[in-house]
Image (spheres, rainbow, N blue to C red):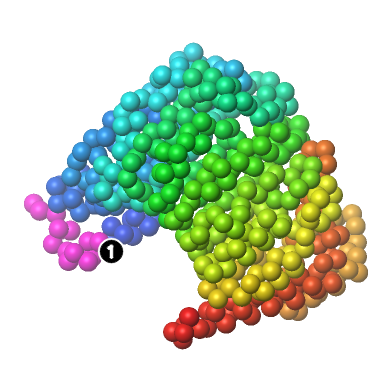
Amino acid sequence: MSCPLIGLATELQHAIIQQLDRTGDQASLRSWSCTCAFYRSLLAPYLYKRIVLRNYEKSASSVHALANSQFKGCIDEINYTAEGECTDVDNWQYWTGETRGDFGNPEAVTDPEEVFPDTVHTLLSDLQRFPRLKTLSIEFPVNFKRKNWGFAFYSEMFDEEETEDEIQSAEENEGWRALMAKTFTALSLNDKPSIKTLEIKKLYPFEISTFRSETFHDFLGPLDRFDLSLFGGENGAGWCINCSNGYLEFVSKLDTYFFDHLNNVTEFCLRAEETGPLGLSGRHHATLALRADQMPLLKSVSLENIFVSPELVDFLVGHTKTLERISLKDCFGGINGETENGIHWEALFTALSDAKPEKLRQFDVLPLDPPYQNMYSHADLSETDGVHLCRTMLEQDPKRRLFPYKILDDKYGTLFHDEDQTLESFLEGDDQKAYDRLICIIDDNASKLASGHG
């Protein structure tokens, strides 16, 4: 007896498949594809458009077989996940994926020669074998499993900048560093443009020798979109990663490693953690390594956990001839504390307005919810007149914004709301006036585009 679904019109077949795909029900799609050759072919673009590659032979062999099959043209995105476990500073243990176990598992692989099978190298060094591949995401999720987790361990990992000899030695002798080095070296061997988007998730603040190589920079050059998020955290005793010299030194070189070579990028995303925000100078402040001469074709920029700073202003103003969209999520001004060159939000808004950004049609400062609900909701304190006025003004005028200011603790590097500065700047109104002026320009640009004159 034939399956009644086969008799449905093609558009209805795809409607059912797309509904399952939207809900993420891959298990049902896989089961459905096993029913017959017709559905295996029909479902292939949905089953194989995003695949996962892991750093062990079983996973790599499966992906390699797919690359040699009739379905290789279905693959749009590869998520490369190199899983690992760290039990000690001098004993970074990376799983092959073949075995799992408890803390201190003696089968965990530490040999630099075993953490990156040849089949993984073959795949990453020749991405053109996937003719429709557009996106590659990379992640090194390390499970930190040390019984005596503390500041000493954290400091040993991130506190000091490494010399070139120390980097080379680590990549030759430590499994986790070998894995990272071999991954990026393999990518640099792609001698022709092979992807449009590169996403690196939670990058650890350790220099990889390949980051300085011309071949790796050539690999970055043709990209349309680059998305980088940085590893963060604190040591369990309160000291944040921005207290570590190794982290501060690493992020100061992101231009040399990546940003200086994104010649064709039109969409750029940079995400720092709250424990290691970027921007401004001073104690515990980390360099924002962005400049106006980078990414000449940039149209869209998304930033997260970044201080409003002179370098941010220069970067954005330097791209006003091409920028169409700016998104600032969980970004903040910094005037007080240990900062040496803090500026107000007004300085950013005014600089952008004065640059007359003719193509800028979207400017988001997120989140939209005003931060005063958390800032001033002290159960043991009555609301001050200033906070009451602030709350009332925001409720009466939906267009008013409360632009946040924050401060880094001079000991722990912790990011705190600068409540007094936020309230003072709100009541003075200079930030709001400059913001309103910029929004008028953006709205005018959008109107011209809608009418066909933009």
Q: Is residue 378 magenta?
A: no
Counting from the top left corner in percent of width and height, residue 418 is at 82, 55
Residue 252 is drawn in which quadrant? top right
Q: Is residue 190 visible?
A: yes
Residue 146 is drawn in which quadrant? top right
Residue range in magenta is 1-15
Please name whichever residue, 276 or 87, is drawn nearer the observer in this view of the structure. Answer: 276
Residue drawn at x 82%, y 38% as measured from the top left:
411
Q: Is residue 221 left or right of residue 295?
A: left
Q: Classify mark 1: residues with Cα within 10 Å, few (<14), some (14-19) or many (20+).
A: few
> Which element type, helix, strand or loop, lies under badge 1?
helix
Question: In this picture, is 44 found above or below 161?
Answer: below
Counting from the top left corner in percent of width and height, residue 322 is at 51, 67
Q: Main secondary structure of the magenta part?
A: helix
Counting from the top left corner in percent of width and height, residue 258 is at 52, 45
Instruction: Give the residue pinned by disc 1.
Output: 15
Question: In this picture, is 392 found above or below 38?
Answer: below
